[in-house]
Amino acid sequence: MECFISDTQFQIKEPTVVTIGKFDGRHKGHQKLLSRMLEWKKACGYKTAVFTFDMAPAAFMEGKPQKVITTNQERRNNMEKMGIDYLVEYPFTKEVSHLSPEKFLETILLGKMNARAIVVGTDCGFGYKRAGNAELLKAQKESLGYELEIVDKKQDDSVHRDISSTYIKEELDRGNIEKANELLGEPYAIHGLVAHGNHMGGPVLGFPTANLLPPPEKYLPPFGVYVSKVLVDGKYYGGITNIGKKPTIRGDNPISVETFVFDLDQDLYGKPIEVQLLNFERPERKFQSLEELKSQINKDKEYGLSYLERFNCL
């Protein structure tokens, strides 16, 4: 996959089928849209190209970061997994925010991205104040010479609600990881390089851990302990993961994602890993002593092993 990141001068020379959106989470609705693009590629030979911005427009307008289920790097990883050919992360600026929908369509989608076909959801929005929509794309397609497919939203049939990033965030806020994963169509994940922590896990508690420091924009579920799967060097391991600030350990600890990986005895510092959350066990809390914490971690481990075995997660 070729990425154009914060680049306004790019040019895709091959004919493409294009879609637009934030693609925060790559949930089942996104997968439906992207799968349709891949079908266009198979039928017509067009390369697949995704347009998004390098930051959430709301972050630019409000002047503060927006929490996202998937960071930009995680989104790139997701698009590559799906088999997308081109990903455009266009810089969002005041000038870009004032582009009319018609100008956005002609200069960026048809011009820079060489779109011969456009695939969008029914609620797509683009251009100044998101004035561009599916109806405008329908009205322009004959005169501008592109094909168009409008894809219905994917629904959660159990509650008759559209699957969206907002819906998934609500479930994450409740600690309802299993429901969030159902909507995502895959486990909620946190990626990163294993960082040095306070080195208490192995020497003091007897449970060596892999420590990730999530970026500030990463949308996290409630602080607490989760059953997890951990991807290391292409292989999955079971684990238990604590998200939070380790209140039992003295000091002003940063928010971290700390995982005790089962059946893995190797130095992970500096290695890229992926932590997938499967089940919320308990909230994070402060223990009266390290011995009490160690005893609880033993219980957490037993809970995690039982869960992984019961649901055949590995």
Image (cartoon, rainbow, N blue to C red):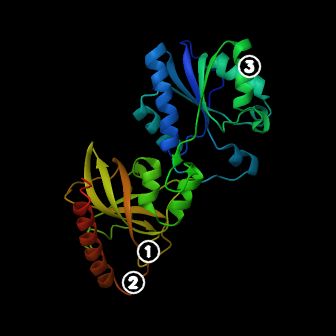
Does residue 258 sit above or below 49 in this rendering? below
Say if residue 103 shows up in the picture.
yes
Q: Nearer the viewer, mark 2 or mark 3?
A: 3
Quadrant position of residue 208: bottom left
Q: Secondary structure at mark 1?
A: loop
Q: Is residue 11 left or right of residue 128?
A: left
| Image position, residue 280 (x, y; %) | 40, 67
Quadrant position of residue 124: top right
| Label 2: how many Cα within 10 Å (few below 14, some 14–19, many 20+) | some
Residues 112 and 269: in front is 112
Residue under label 2, please give it. Answer: 287
Residue under label 3, please give it. Answer: 140
Amino acid type at mark 1: Glu
Residues 21 and 238: in front is 21
Say if residue 216 shows up in the picture.
no
| Image position, residue 254 (x, y; %) | 49, 65
| Image position, residue 92 (x, y; %) | 69, 36
Point out which mark residue 284 bears: 1
Identify the mark nearer the N-term, 3 or 1. Answer: 3
The residue depicted at 55 percent of the width and 13 percent of the height is: 15
Q: Secondary structure at mark 2?
A: loop
Disc 1 to disc 2, C-alpha distance: 10 Å
Q: Secondary structure at mark 3?
A: helix
Disc 3 to disc 1, C-alpha distance: 54 Å
Residues 17 and 160: in front is 160
